[in-house]
Amino acid sequence: MPQTVPASNQPADAEILGERELARLQWRCRRGLLENDIFITRFFERYGPRMTRAQAQAVDTLMDLPDNDLLDLLLRRKEPEPAWAGAEVAAVLELMRPPGDKKPAA
């Protein structure tokens, strides 16, 4: 199975995941709530083949959350805390969220 080799000027976290790494991440992302699984499956269908290591780390961070907290984030019921969610986590979360959804008015 060929591994993607980063270009000499490309940071390691910008490297595209290999097939085996992607499969492991998808297995890790299996959730107890069907709603979360739907969001996550759509995300992998759209972005999985070109997912970078940085994005994979962000997905891994999101998967550490309890199911209900993850669903609240996906449905924009709440936003991620800056203490644990960096820019990459926020960017991946936006990719997982339904297209066209906007943050509810306060």
Image (tube, rainbow, N blue to C red):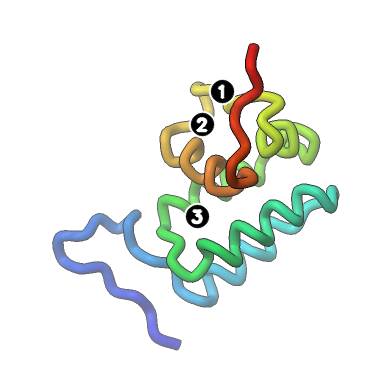
Task: Give the total of numbered labels.
Answer: 3
Indicate the amino acid at tag 1: Glu
Left or right: 69 in relation to 98: right
Indicate the amino acid at tag 2: Ala
- In 3D space, how far apart are the residues under numbered discs 3 and 2 (Cα atoms)? 14 Å
Residue 2: which numbered mark, if any? none
Observer-nearest of 65 and 92: 92
Circle 1 packing at 10 Å, graded few (<14), some (14-19), many (20+), is few
Rendered image quadrant of residue 1? bottom left
Rendered image quadrant of residue 98? top right
- Residue 46 pos. (x, y %): 55, 63
Residue in the image at 15% along x and 60% along y? 9
Indicate the amino acid at tag 3: Ala
Residue in the image at 69% along x and 52% along y? 39
Q: Label 3, secondary structure: give it.
A: helix
In the rendered image, the vertical position of residue 81 relative to residue 26, given as above or below = above
In the rendered image, the vertical position of residue 42 relative to residue 3, given as above or below = above
- Residue 12 pos. (x, y %): 30, 58
Residue 56: which numbered mark, if any? 3
**To which residue does mark 1 refer?**
81
- In 3D space, how far apart are the residues under numbered discs 1 and 3 (Cα atoms)? 19 Å
Q: Label 1, secondary structure: give it.
A: loop
In the rendered image, the vertical position of residue 23 relative to residue 57, given as above or below = below
**To which residue does mark 2 refer?**
85
In the rendered image, the vertical position of residue 29 relative to residue 2, given as above or below = above
